[in-house]
Image (cartoon, rainbow, N blue to C red):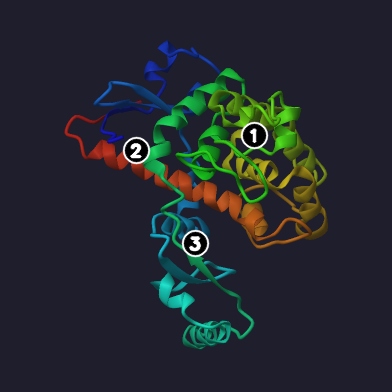
Amino acid sequence: MNIRITHIFLGLGLLAQSAFGQGKFDDHLVEVEIEETKEILTFVKTPELFEDRWDTLAQPNFWKFVMQMSPGTSILNVRRTRQILEITSLAEWNKQSDDEKEAHRQLLREENGLPDDERIFMTTGKSDFYQFEKVFPSISKGVNLFIDNETDPWYAQAILMIESPGKIAYSNVGALGPFQIMKSVARNHGLRVDKYVDERKDFAKSAKASSHLIRTACIPEGKRIMRKFNIKVEGDTQYELWFRLLVLHIYHAGAGNVEKLMVNVIKPKAGGKQLIDTIWHSEYGQFGNSSQNYSQLALASLLILDNLIFEKCTSMDNCTYEN
């Protein structure tokens, strides 16, 4: 789908006349008109990305780079900081023995003034997985389904950009569908999953189960965990970016694993960007590397989405921003 954008409505604008009407999420939404079809697509604004400088953090920018690189690319990077040390061919990297790879890592440590125990990862490019052009039209559908289910639509946008974008695929732990839901979770939230039918493949039903899980479990669990440290999440605080990212960690890793990390390692004094950064650098039990990365991937994806919308808009002569 070749998307050309003619208008972006940044304020309420047409929202009052939209299918879901004037609602509690309207202030968070932006509508985009597609030139070829005149279709209006709905997205969720995340102004904090730029206002609070999340867009300058090394981790999401690293993943933004990885998401746009070929799977044939080898990216050697510092695990702790995600500093990129070298970009080379994956085929050339794979020709080396394990001893040769470690010797090369040690050479990179010496060249970059890193300690001998600094962990250096090899990460491949992932443009084959993150097919954002393909997932772009479905985001608006997910956003509106979450609104219909009275759930913050930001989560639909973030999850769709991370999980199986543009395709339906199983994860390595058995999650399936556009919202990557496990069998037991799907059944607990009203989906049929058996040897005959797997409703996780149905976009609308998967969105309904995901939104119900987030609204009834993930968000309340996030608030409960924060209360253990006398950090109250009330009113509009639940829409702040740091808390939304915390909820994503709960969605991905489970409330129990996030709570154990908080209680045994982090012991937060406050919410905010610093808490999320601490999560990125903390491990405990089942909360490991993939769990740390999840909200980094969300931020990277949202940065790409922002570019996708606004680059296409600014390439048009007739592009207006209405407040």
Q: Residue tagged by mark 3?
A: 58
For this orientation, the residue located farthest to the front is 196
Q: Helix, strand or loop at disc 3?
A: helix
Q: Residues within 10 Å of mark 1 (few under 14, many from 20)?
A: some
Q: Is residue 91 visible?
A: yes
Closer to the observer: label 2 or label 1? 2
Q: Quadrant of residue 166?
A: top left
Q: Is residue 54 above or below residue 158?
A: below
Picture coordinates of residue 271 (x, y %)? 68, 47
Is 222 on the left-hand or right-hand side of 117?
A: right
Earlier sequence position, callout 2 versus callout 3: 3
Do the residues bearing badges 2 and 3 touch, measured as CB atoms within 8 Å? no
User: In the depicted view, which residue is nearer to us: 192 or 205?
Assistant: 192
Do the residues bearing badges 2 and 1 touch, measured as CB atoms within 8 Å? no
Q: Which amino acid type is shown beneath numbered disc 1? A: Gln
Residue under the image location 66 percent in, 45 percent down: 174
Q: Which amino acid type is shown beneath numbered disc 3? A: Ala
Q: Residue tagged by mark 1?
A: 238
Tag shown at residue 63: none
Measured in 3D between alpha carbons, the distance from the residue under mark 2 to the one under mark 3, in whole angstroms, is 23 Å
Closer to the observer: label 2 or label 3? 2
Q: Is residue 233 visible?
A: no
Picture coordinates of residue 316 (x, y %)? 20, 35
Residue under the image location 29 percent in, 34 percent down: 3
Picture coordinates of residue 241 (x, y %)? 57, 42
Earlier sequence position, callout 2 versus callout 1: 1
Q: Residue tagged by mark 2?
A: 309
Do the residues bearing badges 3 and 1 touch, measured as CB atoms within 8 Å? no
Measured in 3D between alpha carbons, the distance from the residue under mark 3 to the one under mark 1, in whole angstroms, is 25 Å
